[in-house]
Image (spheres, rainbow, N blue to C red):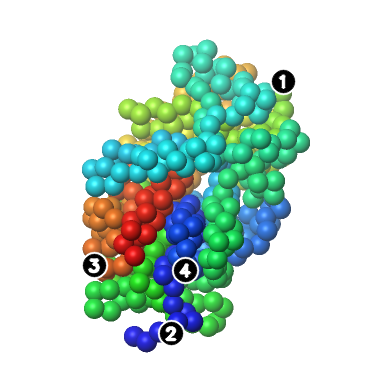
Amino acid sequence: MADNTENRYDVIVAGTGPGGATVALELAKKGKKVLMLEWGRNRRHTGRLIHYVIEQAVPGRSLLFTYRLLGMVRGITTGGSSEFYYATCFDVPYEMLKERGIDITGHVKEARRELHVGPLKDEMITPMAARIMESAQELGYDWQKLDKFMFQERWKPEYRFGYYGDPHNVKWSARMYVNDALALGAELVTGAKVRRVLCEGGLARGVEYRKGLKKYKVFADKIVIAAGGIGSPVILRKSGIPEAGYDFFYDPLVSVCGKMKDMRKQKNEIPMSAGMQLEEEGYIMTDMAVPDMLDNLFAAEVFRFHRMFESRKTIRIMIKARDSLGGRLTDSGGVRKALAPEDREKLMKGARQAREILEKAGATGIYTTWYLAAHPGGTVKAGDLIDEHLETKKFKGLYVCDCSVIPGANGLPPTMTLIGLGRYLAEHLALES
């Protein structure tokens, strides 16, 4: 398998979400020659709806459906889904990872400090979010402010939240790490759809990808696949690891909506400002302001057409569950997994509590939306297909660093876990070379 110095790197990272971008940045800091390959584009986000539609709402590409019409979105752009996430930092499943020999405690602590993670300032809590929190607390729920990945010193009251990308850079996204890596000499190729890892004699040697109609090969001694819980197992199957992509989680969710008479949703609402985690019950609940387009879609999908175009009057609580492992991915990345009855019951129990909170807040016309899913993972589990260094057991030099390596359902947004894993892997790779 011939290569040359022009297309040889120390490390190739496929995917620029939180895991991949962190690995790339940390290795670029250490002077490594790093190439990042990203299927999506790197256009500057201005907060326009069109960017969201192109990069997170194209059916069959970034918008996927199970055979029972449960929708799942993923961001295909530089920075991955972190460009469009709601910037909430939840607990890391330390013990689950430690059982597989992975300790990221120190790495997470450093990341939290550097990214200024913390709850929102009081002036950033809008009246609608405050009403939900007050109502929940009066009912005896432990509803508290949530930690956010936001540079709050940059925030201004007139700024809209970056649902469609944040032009003001208040919300942290993995694209910031990508740009920092580029400034340190790393390279980025966008529009590059990785097809497979080139392996020979039990060793990973390079990557084959397509850009447009052309096929390219690049080479490195260390390959990091960070294409997400769906993308990574698809690549690994084509690379000779057919066991990837089975028995996974996908964090199902619903939201409960009501109509307010005495207040209106503000333009600077910050979703998931506050909420609560019910560990034993297996789900979380948060306030969930969404942009007008999503409000209209949520109403239409459950035939509440009379509630469309009432976004400013809508108050919403999200319920997200820790689901059972199961299902499989097709070779092309199709999702084949049904929502288990016990997981549906978790969501419905949370929905009943949400209805109680909204009624207390003064909402009327309350209804529950259809099921969605977010951040699938567990498709390339640590301790199963990869070892404690995130290296595949079948091919030396081939690593995985994204939500697919999390071995069990946590039911929480995984961003901080992925940043910690990225730092952990970069430290190992730097010591090995």
Image location (x, y in percent) of residue 39? 52, 67
Residue on which the image places disc 1:
262
Q: If you read the primary sequence from the N terminus, does the residue marked by circle 2 or circle 1 appear first?
A: 2
Residue on which the image places disc 4:
33
- In the picture, measured across the screen, residue 113 lies left or right of residue 308, that is left
Residue on which the image places disc 3:
394
Helix, strand or loop at label 1? It is loop
Residue on which the image places disc 2:
4
Quarter of image, res 404 = bottom left
Packing grade of label 2 (10 A; few <14, some 14-19, many >=20) is few
Image location (x, y in percent) of residue 273? 57, 30
Residue 178 in sight from this viewpoint: yes
Near-viewer residue (49 or 187): 187
Q: Residue sitting at 60 percent across and 65 percent down?
A: 41
Residue 58 in sight from this viewpoint: no
What is the three-letter code of the residue carrying label 4? Lys
Q: Are marks 3 and 2 in contact (CB under 8 Å)?
A: no
2 or 1: mark nearer the eye = 2
